[in-house]
Amino acid sequence: MPARTRLGETPHTPDLRERILRVMDRKMHRAWPVLSGPDATRGQLRVHYRQEWAVYVRDFPVFLSRVHARCPVMEVRRGLAENLYEEETGGLSGQGPHPELFLELMEALGFPRGDFEDVDLLPEAAAYRAWLDRATTRLPWPVSLGVATIFVEGSVHERRETADPPPPPEDPEAEVRGHFLVRHQGVDPGRLRLIRAHRTVERSHRASAWRMVLASVTGSRREDALVRVMERTLRSWLSYRDAVARAAGI
């Protein structure tokens, strides 16, 4: 894409956003109500979180940096750099590096840091991680951008969180106190600094991600390619989460 293209110029077809949202609407797994519910055991959570750490939590900043390094558009690079800065340092939220905050939360659950060293990935988890590595290194950078900032960083709630006008802001502390790990697992709310960090920067990061992706994916062939890759990523993610559910006995 020519470097002169600006983020305000979004030459995407009118339904591109909706096509991507339809993929994100399906980023939900049947095991999640169990894992986030009152009957989840610490053993089940340990299986889940160890795989999450090794698949993407530890290395999400790496995914961002890969796209940043290949992107020729200054405005997109700035948006990625801001996201990367927060992930690696917590400098925007004031909470700390996000991988470190994750490990802090795991310690609050009773899982020592050693549990997250040399994690053996389930075969489906390894396949999903291999796909993310390929998607963030070998695909055209705008497609890689969509995978990293919309699929990996986004959730099934993408439609609501990116609505126009946006939903009214929620009280971050009320969200922390109501978090399932606090309610069901008895975790001290003070140890949920990762959740506070997400709530502090999440809305601006989601808006930035969508703006960057929609402005960068130009032409119908590129748009179709992005949607196909998002669908492929969803299939791999669901297979990965099926394997976690089996390993956790769900």
Image (tube, helix red, strand yellow):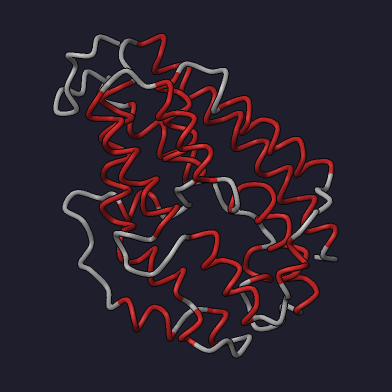
Front residue of this view, candidates 146 and 95: 95
Q: Where is the N terminus found, in terms of image quarters?
A: top left
Front residue of this view, candidates 12 and 77: 77
- For image coordinates 70% across by 32% down, the residue present is 130
Q: Is residue 11 above or below residue 198?
A: above
- For image coordinates 23% across by 62% down, the residue present is 167
Q: Position of residue 16 (x, y in %)?
A: 34, 26
Q: Where is the C terminus found, in terms of image quarters?
A: bottom right
Q: Is residue 56 above or below residue 115?
A: above
Quadrant in which residue 169 is drawn: bottom left
Left or right, 214 with respect to 154, comes to: left
Give the number of callouts: 0
Q: Is residue 19 above or below residue 248?
A: above
Front residue of this view, candidates 239 and 128: 128
Left or right, 169 with respect to 192, comes to: left
- For image coordinates 37% across by 54% down, the residue present is 86
- For image coordinates 57% across by 18% down, the residue present is 138
Q: Position of residue 181 (x, y in %)?
A: 57, 80
Q: Position of residue 225 (x, y in %)?
A: 48, 16
Q: Position of residue 162 (x, y in %)?
A: 29, 49
